[in-house]
Image (tube, helix red, strand yellow):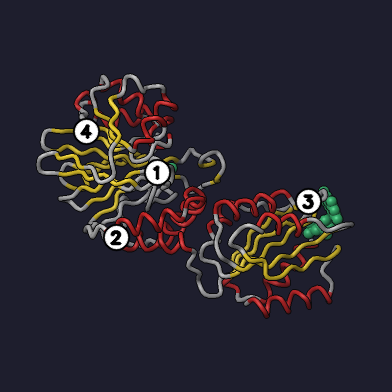
Amino acid sequence: MPRIWVEEITKGLYVLRVDDDRVKSFEAIWDLPEGATYNAYLLKTDGKTILFDGWKRSYEAEFIETLKGLTRIEDIDYIILHHTEPDHSGTLPKVLELNGYRAKVFGHPVAGRLVNGFYGIGDKMDFHAIADGEELKLGSRTLKFLHTPWLHWPDTICTYMVEDGILFTGDAFGGFSMPDKLFDDGELDEYLHYVKKYIVNVVGHYKEHISKSIDKLSGMNIEIRMIAPLHGLIWKNDTHKIIEYYRDIAEGKAKKGKVLIVYSSMYGFVEGAIDHIIAKLPKDSVKVFKFTDMEQDSISDALAEVPDSELIILGASTYEAGAFPMMEFFARQLAHKANYKKSVLMISSYGWGGAAARVIKNILSETNFEIRDTVEYRGRADEPILHEIDKSLDKLS
Ligand SMILES: Cc1cc2nc3c(=O)[nH]c(=O)nc-3n(C[C@H](O)[C@H](O)[C@H](O)COP(=O)(O)O)c2cc1C
Ligand SMILES: [Fe+2]
Ligand SMILES: [Fe+2]
């Protein structure tokens, strides 16, 4: 049985959270031994019942059970879809079926097409495409809907519960892992690391939209007393902290002196140069990820270290007239998910004809990364090569 959390977080508003410790690769690509949560919410107010989102379909039975503990499913009047990715919409077909399709489903204009595409429920579902700024009055409570596209799909909306100052934000302001608490109480550093990883792995390709949406929210001059995302912690003590954290990661605010090293080494020839570099840098300022015959580090974790790094050192072996496959993949994800304005030092080794550096330079050529120096050598990094590397390091750090 997965761990399930149900709690009334303010009068008549309940969180329904499931801790997914079974998922191995989020979206079938990003490894997350730390797991993830899916958060749905239920509001009972003024004689109406409103469901916000749902869980992944693999937890459908548990979701229905949990929901039944709070309401008769037939009684749900409205379902709000903040984002239709199936980690949140997977339980929608079952809920609607048990509800007899009574509920009005509210979402971004794109959302109706998406859920119909996924589940074929378009002709039965009473879908209402909400306009940006539209309101739903429920007596003592008002829900104001805002379009916040590309967080992380084009269908994303936020809902502001006006009287309570609660903002439902979809994927935005969420994070990976299964924190042992519901709210932003106590120590947060470990969780924030998983927030950073979530931002880069999941929303990274659309990161410009994070700043845009934050600007839009700030421009509205609304008081945000609580942030209720679809993954991870609910923020009630310090909503500014998570908003600013998201902005910093989206904008790539660097920690002074932080260096990220990612390298491959089949027989230790790239590693020789990398070990030399590591020995020269202050220990606690360096994060190292490697692909060797003894260790295969996580590309998801490596990507998470990009936004707050100052310098990125890539060490790539030449492999079949190209770059070592994991390094090529990592470079492609740098371009795609973590395209930040950062300096790069490229180290590469080859046997009979260098290719890795060229391939990676090509991948990064149209990005914000700037390859400041390349040190390429045959086989091992001997004294003259190490000297060349030292000169580059002096220039760059
Ligand atoms: C499977 C494999 C494929 C390779 N392909 C090439 C190649 O296409 N061109 C080349 O110049 N060297 C090639 N090499 C040689 C390596 O690039 C060279 O030995 C380099 O020093 C490896 O560094 P590393 O031990 O740190 O991975 C290959 C080596 C291996 C094991
Ligand atoms: Fe998503
Ligand atoms: Fe999500």
| The C terminus - image quarter | bottom right
Spatial CA distance of label 4 from label 2 is: 34 Å
Residue found at x 78% / y 78%: 387
Badge 1 amino acid: Thr
At which x and y percent is residue 24?
53, 40
Q: Is residue 374 left or right of residue 342?
A: right
Spatial CA distance of label 4 from label 1 is: 20 Å
Answer few, some or many: residues within 10 Å of disc 1's Cα (few below 14, many 20 plus, some between 14 and 19): many
Badge 4 amino acid: Leu
Reading the chain from its start, which is encountered first: label 2 or label 1?
1
**Mark in front: 1 vs 3:** 3
Residue found at x 24% / y 48%: 160
Q: Is residue 226 left or right of residue 298?
A: left
Q: Which residue is the site of mark 2?
A: 218
Q: Is residue 170 left or right of residue 203?
A: left
Residue 322 got which mark? 3
> Which sits in the foreground, 347 or 289?
347
In the rendered image, which quarter is residue 350 located in? bottom right
Answer few, some or many: residues within 10 Å of disc 4's Cα (few below 14, many 20 plus, some between 14 and 19): some
Answer few, some or many: residues within 10 Å of disc 2's Cα (few below 14, many 20 plus, some between 14 and 19): few
**Mark in front: 3 vs 2:** 2
Residue found at x 25% / y 46%: 133
Badge 2 amino acid: Ser
Answer few, some or many: residues within 10 Å of disc 3's Cα (few below 14, many 20 plus, some between 14 and 19): some
